[in-house]
Image (spheres, rainbow, N blue to C red):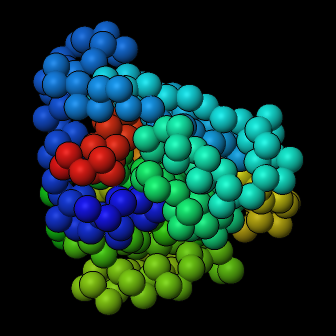
Amino acid sequence: MAIRHFLDLSDAGGNAIAAMLNDAIDRKAARGGWPRGKADRDEPLSGHVLAMIFEKSSTRTRVSFDVAMRQLGGTSLVLDSATTQLGRGESIADTARVLSRMVDAIMIRTDDHAKIEEMARHATVPVINGLTDRSHPCQIVADLLTVLEQGKALPGLELAWLGDGNNVLHSMLEAAALMKFNVRIGTPRGYEPDGDFVALARASGSQVTLTNDAAEAVAGADIVVTDTWVSMGQDHTHNKLAAMAPFQVSDALMSLAKNEARFLHCLPAHVGEEVSESVFEGSQSVVFDEAENRIHAQKTILLWCFGTL
Ligand code: CP
Ligand code: NVA
């Protein structure tokens, strides 16, 4: 079997994503209220080690991958790039080849997407994208799981995205293409997502609306999503924040979505910027289910990478 890297959702494809979501639902249910560090009964990754490389900060991705490996019967270790030789200029190619002799999989969070492609070219173990400037596929598996838990089907779902056209939106558009849902994107002019992701979703039959009118984007939506206006590595400019202000997810905007609409945010949130406190803390917000689901998503992504799904 070819090495299964998970650099983007399309590496797995729609059928595998559907299987992953089913597996995540089953594994989550089977655990009930067990302590988080206790392994699943089958310990499918017993003896396996995951190395995690962080060139950017992380709370959820770091903790959820670590706990995921424990629940699958394996272990993980974190490499802070600043204190490794990678931080002193050792090449990605050599790092990939060395780690491939020492661990069973590599997760990397970095800036330039080309770096994880380079890592995957040289690694002989699976490489997982833990976020790049271009995409954040692991987050979207958790988001889809959260949508399903809310009793909503993916095909035909109307998902509204407000704010910055960023890495998380790119992976959401890829998911729309694979799982056949529609995305209405409300951004200020100049902050639209990369056109390649829009084209990919449209080519697969998904409807993608691009608008500069926040109300138009959320009208009738099943799910409303936003993310920070300033991603890691970007400049915090006054002009950008001013342009984003009309796209704050507020009670007024949520009231235009369906009554049973839900609010998602990958976190960390900047309450008072991209989302009002009342929406973030309100009854339609499922952001902490979404955060918990990172564990269940990482587990099924790991199982897919190891060929056991
Ligand atoms: N959502 C997410 O990836 O969170 P962290 O940056 O904390 O990993
Ligand atoms: N778009 C955000 C996501 C953080 C999880 C960023 O890249 O900083």
Can you tell which quarter of the image residue 43 is in? top left
Residue at 66% over, 42% down: 54
Side (left or right) of 125 relative to 231: left
Give residue 137's position: percent from left, percent from top: 44, 57
Residue at 66% over, 35% down: 79
Residue at 42% over, 88% down: 199
Above or below residue 69? Residue 191 is below
Counting every numbered tag in the picture gives 0
Which of the pair 175/44 is nearer the observer?
44
Can you tell which quarter of the image residue 238 is in? bottom right
Side (left or right) of 126 relative to 20: right
Give residue 104's position: percent from left, percent from top: 43, 41
Q: Residue furthest front?
A: 101
Which of the pair 206/215 is nearer the observer?
206
For the N terminus, the quadrant is: bottom left
One can see residue 162 in this view: no
Residue at 80% over, 34% down: 83
Side (left or right) of 208 relative to 109: left
Q: Residue furthest top?
A: 35
Which of the pair 13/248 is nearer the observer?
13
One can see residue 191 in this view: yes
Give residue 251's position: percent from left, percent from top: 47, 47
Above or below residue 81? Residue 9 is below
Give residue 257's position: percent from left, percent from top: 33, 59
Which of the pair 241/3 is nearer the observer?
3
Side (left or right) of 238 relative to 140: right
Can you tell which quarter of the image residue 233 is in? bottom right
